[in-house]
Amino acid sequence: MIRLLQRLWSLSVDEVLLFLEVLFLLAFMAFSLRRKPLQGILRHLPRATSLKKSLDPYRRKQVVWAVNAAARRFPVFRNCLVQALAVYVLLTRRRVASVLLIGSPMNAETFTAHAWVEVGGLPVFGEPAQHFQVLYSYPP
């Protein structure tokens, strides 16, 4: 815990605020998925108007860093669906047109699923879509 506080102290105010926002979103999404089916959660996700179609590389790096940092420190947030939902909400709040995708590996012998987020057809968070068959996308 002391190392976390030391690390937070070394960050800029924007980075600390982003980390805390991601931490809250991850906790909220993890709790929500235990209480409601995915469709119930998706119904309440924000939808922004006049969205940007791309995400600058610096902002992308910050988002990925914040989600990975939170997941490293709190293992309960290591679920790809929880992380993808949090990233989707985070980007939508910043008016970035993102898509939440859920898919399954193309050549898997057993069924497994994975969630990731794309902006402009490029993965922002999670594995690239080329390894997965898309089963669901939000917004459709």
Image (tube, rainbow, N blue to C red):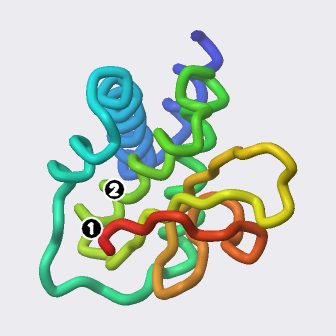
Q: Which mark is residue 90?
A: 2
Q: Foreground: 40 or 84? A: 40
Q: Secondary structure at mark 1?
A: loop
Q: Foreground: 29 or 138? A: 138
Q: Which mark is residue 15?
A: none
Q: Is residue 128 above or below residue 63?
A: below
Q: Position of residue 135 (x, y in %)?
A: 53, 64
Q: Position of residue 41 (x, y in %)?
A: 25, 43
Q: Secondary structure at mark 2?
A: helix
Q: Residue at x 38, y 73 (%)?
A: 98
On the image, which quarter does residue 129 sit in?
bottom right
Q: Position of residue 13 (x, y in %)?
A: 37, 46
Residue behind mark 1 = 94
Measure the C-alpha gap from mark 1 to mark 2: 7 Å
Q: Residue at x 34, y 23 (%)?
A: 31
Quadrant placement of the C terminus: bottom left
Q: Residue at x 22, y 42 (%)?
A: 40
Q: In screen coordinates, is 62 left or right of 91? A: right
Q: In screen coordinates, is 94 left or right of 98? A: left
Q: Residues within 10 Å of mark 1 (few under 14, many from 20)?
A: few
Q: Is residue 68 above or below residue 31?
A: below
Q: In screen coordinates, is 74 left or right of 104? A: left
On the image, which quarter does residue 92 sit in?
bottom left
Quadrant placement of the N terminus: top right
Q: Position of residue 35 (x, y in %)?
A: 28, 22
Name the amino acid type tagged 2.
Leu
| Mark 1 touches mark 2? (CB < 8 Å) | yes
